[in-house]
Amino acid sequence: MSLFAVSGSRSRKLCGLILFAAAAFPAVAPDAGILLAWDRGTVAYDNGYQAVVEPVFPADSTHLLPPAPHGPSIPLRIINNSGREITGALLYAGATDFRGNGVQDLDRRIDLPAHGETTVELALDRLAGKPGFYDVRVLVFDRGRELAYDEFTFGYDVSGRPVDIHPPADFDRFWQATLDSLKAVPPGVTMQLDSLLSTGTVDVYRVSYASLHRVRVHGWYTVPRWKPGPHAALLFLPGYSTGRISPKVGHSGQGFATLSIQVRGYGVDQEDYPPDNRSYMTIGVDDPETFVYREIVCHCLRGIDFLELRPEVDRGRICAIGGSQGGGLSLLAGGLDKRVGFIVAGVPFLTDFPLSMEITGNPCRNLVWYLEENPGKKEKVFRTLSYFDVLNVAARIKVPTLVSMGLWDRTCPAPAIYEMFLALGSADKEIGIYPYLDHGEVGGPHGPVVDRWLDQHLRPGEDGKAGPGGSR
């Protein structure tokens, strides 16, 4: 098991956090000795913040802290940029869990020299014996004026959190029956060379095949022309509500055969897509037989059928790859089909639905709204979701797997992803942790990590070297 961190931008909008901080305590005017309301108008925004406050973590830190007898302790560095000595500044820190519950807040008076920095230890003793992920907001005030603000997220003793896995009793029966239904549908593959998108080194094909319920699934298939097969193959699975799909010409330029599919049964390059391509989280959710993801997972597994039948593909080197929904689908495919030999799952969705529904936005929020409107269906809905929860197949995944997560991600939250990562049955598993990145931000810095991982594990070019096809 391998964990690594990649630094990213620490900028973040405050959103509603200012209200939280303002309500947590009123500013104090030391000379007056009375409590005053926090006046945002006194902050000197024209000159920016007059101080900096930040946690002190190693440059390569994952922000995952080990257990300690008295809970985690995090140094805070405060740099005074005002050019004057400040006495009696008020430091406030508030910690919340990912559900937004306050777990501890602290305040103290500090003196800041005109030059240099001051270090204050943030001792969160109330977290002793409480493994989990936490957000911290830190503010520094001088006589009601906000001098500095920062927020960060960390995990405490997260490897010690119990992983609660309870798949339904008929999980295997359900999926075997589903796979049998899929096998009963002839693939009916069509392939058409797209001469406009093909290059001198890569052939691009428009493809389609029949899946569960005889739905036609459309996609792009790309294959290197510059070297003979058999090629390692990448099955690219899309994020939630993805419409248009692009062929992965760059990856074939590096030596991979690739299949990219549109999982809602629509074309790969339509001008417009209907509403049920943008929002479909609750379609058929009352029953696992009718839930939309039963079809979607089958569309992905039929993609493996497609690749396995291609003579230029090395059947022993098929990798399922995707981000968000695509990451979750890659893991589900790997847990249900042993022909998947490698998995790359970026910020994966479809993981621990009960937990994710408590702390996330869309698309899980759609499930929450559905249950608010249909409270009598809660048991049915959670039963359905359990058949499609990556957590319930994680232990079955024995192949090399690369995962990523951002600690600021509330779409696919770190607690759900990390417990799934711990449950993975693979001895060769890695997770990239991005302490200051949100859901849509992880892909950028994680891209080169994925490229290196693919080169290391699938050896696409001659002697393990990449080919002449340019960037991916």
Image (cartoon, rainbow, N blue to C red):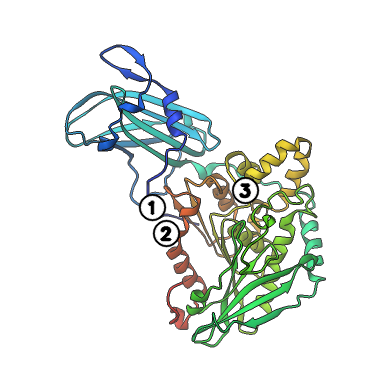
What's the residue at 58%, 60% (across, down)?
Answer: 426
Give the amino acid at mark 3. Answer: Pro
Give the amino acid at mark 2. Answer: Pro
Query: Dot 3: what SS?
Result: loop
- Where, by quadrant of the figure, is residue 48 drawn? top left
Q: Nearer the viewer, residue 390 or 269?
A: 269
What's the residue at 46%, 54% (across, down)?
Answer: 441
> In x, y percent, where is residue 74?
37, 37
| Residue under pointer 1 | 8
> In x, y percent, where is residue 294?
74, 58
- Where, by quadrant of the figure, is residue 342 drawn? bottom right
Query: Dot 1: what SS?
Result: loop
Q: How many marks?
A: 3
Give the number of the mark in front: 3 or 2. 3
Contact between marks 2 and 1 (CB within 8 A): the answer is yes
Relative height, residue 394 to residue 156 (above, below): below
Relative height, residue 407 to residue 237 (above, below): above
Q: Nearer the viewer, residue 116 or 261?
A: 261
Label number found at residue 363: 3
| Residue under pointer 2 | 445
> Is residue 382 shown left or right of residue 128?
right
The Cα–Cα distance between marks 3 and 2, rounded to whole angstroms, is 24 Å
The Cα–Cα distance between marks 2 and 1, rounded to whole angstroms, is 8 Å
N-term mark: 2 or 1 = 1
Relative height, residue 133 to residue 303 (above, below): above
